[in-house]
Amino acid sequence: MTRRGSSDDPPAWIGDAVIYQIFPDRFARSDGVPKPSGLEPWGEAPTTFGYKGGDLLGIVARLDYLAELGVTAVYLNPIFQSGANHRYHTHDHHRVDPMLGGDAAFRTLRDELHARDMRLILDGVFNHASRGFLQFHDVLENGRDSAYLDWWHIEGFPLDAYGEGDDGHRYRAWWGMPALPTFNVATPAVREHLWGVATRWLEEGADGWRLDVPEEIDDRSFWSEFRRRCRDVRSDAYLVGEIWDEGRSWVGGDPFDGTSYYPLTRAILGLVGRALDHDLAAQSGLDRIAPLTVATFAERLEELVVKRPASEREARMTLLGSHDTARVRTLLGGDRAAVRQAYGLLLALPGAPCIYYGDEIGLEGGHDPDNRATFPWDAPDRWDGELLEEIRARVAVRKRHPALRRGETEVLRAHERTLWLGREAGDDRALVVVRLPDDAATPQAESVQLPERWRGHWSSALGSGGLEVTSDGSARGDPIPGRSTAWFVPG
């Protein structure tokens, strides 16, 4: 699947993608990868530092599950050799962690994904490394005589690599954590190393990179060259930055195709989250989420979606949660209706929706380590089967209708209790109706005053029933349940 050449445009495939994020240590464990003896039991509550033993061959064994969900791309949290279960403490960028199955398991996973027309996105942690990284370990061993002093921001000797807090360890570290020494990307050898890692794994068959904390490398020339080299290897490589705010200066062809689009996350949760745990959200980069009315959500949607160019909105990685937030069901106070409504909105809007493993079955959990529990494959009684089936159905409809993937988005009406959205791509159209109250109101009660091209008969995209938008702008038909997101297509 390798492509040559370069382009400033996002890869064509990302606008149609459905991404599934996997935390490798916690998703699935196989017997094909030898395990150390000190693993925690699979189903028990996770701890901050303990390992569960998930591996890449375990993912291979569950690819049919992902295919049934409608997944077209898998995004893996870091997979390179590390001394941490999350593997953001990199030891060796050129070696897949043996506990995950090593390079051989990577190749197997790559081949099995590509055989199913699925893509593979890797997590690039290029701002910092770890105390076990060879070039930093050399400084620890040899002090002022190390050949790698200029790889790091050394401020004095002796180094205290196991000290506490910002002061005393005498080198710069990410957020002052001595376990995470930051690279000096002004050093040519460091730049070449990181660029070489990026291109090497694209040559090995990865389809893109999710870049961890890219704002921490405040050097646009580094990122511009990063993009150029990646696109020289693969013109369809997807580059997405972990940016928590709007991040518009980071997209548009230089340096990234898109960002992890948390602004939309905040808007959706602010609309549907009547039991939203604001304090829990504030413990992450989500910060405090403002409650939104239908009208204020519509205004936000105009800013975030409607007025943005297609290339920008389609290349975003849109999401409701990740390994850096509490799980969406927990953020929403365990409110199942709110979770289902949130997914109905996420999957009806442009961007590449990313599902954090287990959220589709309603797993709960606060912040690390609770949001990184093992997938309960052997405990289906813990699954929210209705949520899983609804997400499967919505993804299937999204795949059938270009309007739901690449269509223009129009706010048709924002009533105090109901939002009407239109999505349109060529001859394909869809109506999205978001109802907030608990009571079920019939469309006859809505004088929606839709533009003429939206009038006519509409069928439910997710089951029986439908509605008629008449010549006077009234909507007549079956009741739309409160606290739901309904999709309609012509016919």
Image (spheres, rainbow, N blue to C red):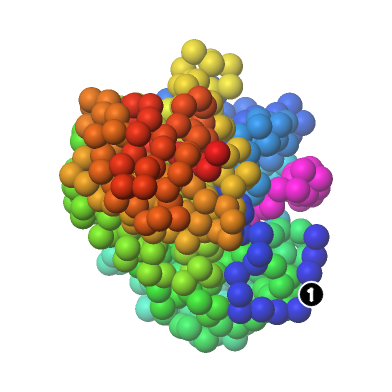
Q: Residue at x 73, y 26 (%)?
A: 31
Q: Where is residue 117 shown, x and y percent of the image?
A: 75, 48
- The answer to whether residue 291 is above or below residue 41 is below
Q: Is residue 115 left or right of residue 467?
A: right
**Magenta segment includes 112:** yes
Secondary structure type for disc 1:
loop
- Residue 39 visible in the current orientation: yes
**Magenta segment includes 214:** no
Q: Amino acid at mark 1?
A: Arg
- The answer to whether residue 3 is above or below residue 74 is below
Q: Is residue 202 left or right of residue 385?
A: right
Q: Where is residue 419 shown, x and y percent of the image?
A: 30, 46
Q: Residue at x 73, y 70 (%)?
A: 234
Q: Name the one closer to the observer, 412 or 80.
A: 412
Q: Residue at x 79, y 75 (%)?
A: 4
Q: Name the one closer to the observer, 85 or 480.
A: 480
Question: To which residue does mark 1 refer?
Answer: 4
Q: Which quadrant is home to the N terminus?
A: bottom right
Q: Residue at x 34, y 26 (%)?
A: 479
Q: Residues within 10 Å of mark 1 (few under 14, many from 20)?
A: few
Q: Where is residue 26 shown, x and y percent of the image?
A: 54, 34
- Residue 140 visible in the current orientation: no
Tell me the magenta residue range.
Answer: 103-127
In the orientation shown, which residue stands out farthest toward the top? 381
Q: Where is residue 405 shown, x and y percent of the image?
A: 55, 53
User: Residue 332 sits in which quadrant?
Assistant: top left
Q: Name the one closer to the observer, 242 or 24.
A: 242
